[in-house]
Image (tube, rainbow, N blue to C red):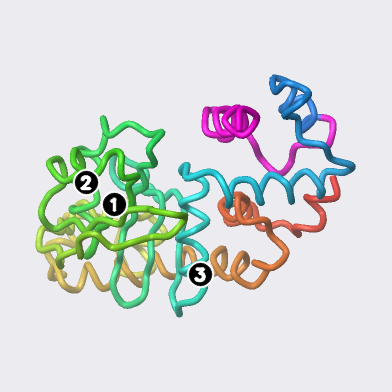
Amino acid sequence: MENLDRLREFFTAKNLKSYHPLMSEKELAKWVEPLEPSTLFSFQSKIDFLKQLNSFAQSHLEDELFLKQLLTKTFFEEDIIGAFEVKALSSRLDLLKINGVTTAFEIKSEFDSLEKLEKQSQDYLALFEYNYLVVGEKHLEKAEKVLPHEFGIYTVKNKKLKRFRASRRNRSINPKSQLSILTSKELRIEFKSNESNWILANYSSTEINEAFKKILKKRYTQKWNFIKERSSEIFPLDYQYFFHHPISPQLIYSR
């Protein structure tokens, strides 16, 4: 039990966030050096280590990386386009789902702080049609007080997501904010202009929202399909890495 607690402490601290699949076998061995020998992962190869790490995470952790892969697996079962770490004004959204509507998911595990949640929620309400917080039960009571009423909430218990509160359709979308997170090239292709003031004067908020969804879907389709089609080859904790770096998993894992 003591060894298990030490492993949890190690992997739910900043240490897990410093992991990435490009680490070599030697680097991985150095990474787990702070653990006592009795708790050290015993591995013969990089692949062996990653199998153990992912198995441990899915059995014993409920940190941000675990919750992201849990959501991602549910997304793979749907006909949607997803995206990780989407720039959202002054915030960065953990996961976005696009399937006719935009649905934002912000993750706060029991190891995270809610300090930025109020500002993040306002940023997401300016951009997306539905918004959810995925939160550890430790933070549920406080999160309810901070979140706008439009936000839905998922809690995590026994490694499963449970919808605590449904999201309401957001009526506070700001078309100027939506245009601000699109590139000049994306604006020119869709609106024939990259001047926000001209677009706002010539298109309705509904038209801008529809174009916004179309642009984001186009931006992320290739990256999302890459990890979805190779989900059986990618370790769950690495979904986000391969979304941003569409490289052969075999090439990375054999490094």
Numbered disc in front, either 1 or 2: 1
Q: Which mark is residue 121?
A: 2
Q: Which residue is mark 3?
A: 221
State the predominant SS element of the stretch in magenta.
helix
Element under label 3? helix
| Tag 1–tag 2 contact (CB < 8 Å) | yes
Task: Tell me if residue 135 can be seen.
Answer: yes
Numbered disc in front, either 2 or 3: 2
Measuring 15% from the left and 56% from the top, which residue is drawn there?
A: 174
Element under label 1? strand
**Left or right for 130, reference 236:** left
Above or below residue 34? Residue 46 is below
Residue interval drawn in magenta = 1-26
Residue 189 within the segment the image draws in magenta: no
Q: Which residue is mark 1?
A: 133
Above or below residue 67? Residue 102 is below
**In the rendered view of the protein, which quadrant contains the C terminus?**
top right
The Cα atoms of the two marked residues, 1 and 2, are separated by 9 Å
